[in-house]
Amino acid sequence: MALTALWHRGEVVMVHDRFRDHWELPGGLREPGETPRRTAVRELFEESGQVPGGPLRFVGYAGFLLGPEQRAEYGALFTGHALRRRGFEADHEIGAMRWWDLTAPLPGRVSDIDAYLARLTRPAASRRGAV
């Protein structure tokens, strides 16, 4: 699994997963022969329509428990910047996409782990309030 925190002007892209009914970072499972970095780029585009403005930076691995059975999952976390904001089209999996400043409320539930991971990757200039 790979996740991406993509930033643009102090906001991170979040997607609303229809099945889990919450906002989360774009990400998903690796396909056969795919590197985690390639998975991150592919899933970012498939789920949000966004593309990084350069190579994604590997941040580390995140471990978490999913589902009622609390199964252990691990994901490679990447971060980067978008040069511009691109359009978005909803599909059967992702119903919405938003750029989030980590403070304004999003409509509905936000994944706690994804909000935490986004905060870990927040660019230093954004933490000081600069754009």
Image: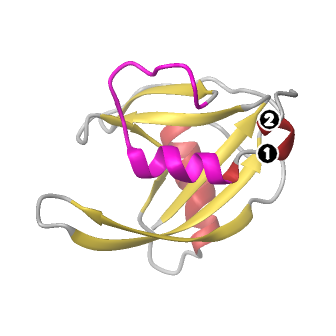
Report the front residue among 119 and 2: 119
Label 1 amino acid?
Answer: Pro
Identify the image's colour scheme: rainbow, by chain, secondary structure or one colour: secondary structure
Query: Is 117 left or right of 127, judged from the image as shown?
Result: left
Magenta segment includes 115: yes
Question: Label 1: how many residues lie within 10 Å, few (<14), some (14-19) or many (20+)?
Answer: many
Callout 2–callout 1 Cβ contact below 8 Å? yes
Label 2 amino acid?
Answer: Ser
Report the front residue among 107 and 104: 104
Report the front residue among 92 and 58: 58
User: Can residue 75 be seen here?
Assistant: yes
> What's the residue at 87%, 28% (across, down)?
130
Mark 2 and mark 1: span between their CA atoms?
5 Å
Residue 106 placement: quadrant: top left
Q: Please give the residue where the numbered disc 2 appears in the rendered image.
A: 126
User: Can residue 25 be seen here?
Assistant: no
Q: Could you say whether the residue bearing mark 1 is in a helix, strand or loop?
A: loop
The x, y position of residue 60, in whole percent, is: 62, 72
Disc marking residue 123: 1
Residue 16 vs 66, above or below: the answer is above
Report the front residue among 99 and 111: 111
Task: Please state, as top left, top right, bottom left or bottom right, where the N terminus lies in the image.
Answer: bottom left
The x, y position of residue 105, in whole percent, is: 47, 20
Report the span colored magenta. 102-120
Disc marking residue 15: none
